[in-house]
Image: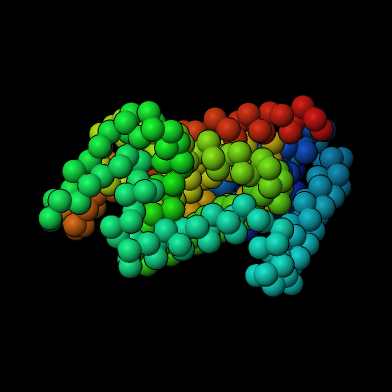
Amino acid sequence: MTNQSDTWTLVAEISPQFDLSVVCAVLDMQRISYKINRLEHSQELWVEFPEQVPLVLSVLENVNKQESARQQHQQNQSITQQLKKMPIIALLLLLSILGTALTEWAFPLIHWFTFQDMDFIGNNVHFHTAENAMDKGQYWRLITPIFLHFGIFHLAFNGVLLWELGRRIEPLAGSVHMGVVALLMAVASNLGQYLWSGPSLFGGMSGVVYGLLGYIWIRHKTNPQPILAIPRGLLGFMLFWLLLGMSGFINLFMSGSIANTAHAVGLITGMILGGWAGRGASRST
């Protein structure tokens, strides 16, 4: 039992995996004074006035029902049905598969889709500048590196995270919004990586994935929605992986290097877009 002032009443002990952000947002709107104690194996929700307990229990029950219904609805849908409702995520996954096939079986052709053009001279690669490509009107290069994946593991890692994060955004915000957000994240992360590292060979959906993580993180804080709740472990792992990559430690075990700047720029871009979208959603409700 947690020590509290005699004026406070324990409402419920809740699983630590349960996201209370939506509950807190509702209680804040109703001006209910509450406290949350996060313990090792549970979360305790307290209210200041005992007469508010029934109302808080009702809020907890409604939020839990909504989340359970959403999860059950997703489980009952086939992958095909889910993809039909997420055309942008489906398109990004398909193009990533095609990009991986290109790098695996038609590597000399990837120069059409890298951020800057490059020539293969024997075993050497000569990189042009991105400015040269833009002068030629090759603006697709601002986006296409996100589809180039170097190996099945690279594709699988990004594909799973793209699905896990994207399926929380597109059904909530719509496909047009999803498309614009993904486009901005792609351009920002690719441009950031090029400006930091100069002409080089880089690719992958990771910048967009980190952008989606930042978007969900901040939008959920700004305008909590059950669908935006992601496991804390996933957020912690991805931030830890970003810091580990930036430390240079991972590069010791790889033949290439991680596009850490693309990850960081994507994350920051997503956080900005998530804050903007969250504030807009809050004003409209």
Q: The C terminus is located in which quarter? A: top right
Q: Quadrant of residue 181?
A: top right
Horizontal side of residue 54 vs 123, given as left or right: right
* Image coords of residue 214 (percent x, y): 52, 40
Percent across and percent down for residue 141 are: 41, 41
Q: Position of residue 33 (x, y in %)?
A: 74, 32
Residue at (81% x, 47% y) in the render: 59
31 or 273, which lies in front? 273
- Pick the front one: 5 or 103: 103
Query: Residue extending furthest front?
Result: 136
Residue at left offset 68%, top offset 47%: 175
Q: How is the rendered protein coloured? A: rainbow
- The relative height of residue 88 versus residue 282 in the rendered view (above or below) is below
Q: Position of residue 163 (x, y in %)?
A: 56, 58
Does residue 81 appear left or right of residue 231 in this picture? right
Q: Quadrant of residue 188?
A: top left
Disc tally is 0
Residue 47 at least partly seen: yes
- Which residue occupies 66% across, 40% down? 177
Report if residue 44 is visible in the image.
Answer: no
Residue at 34% x, 54% y is 110
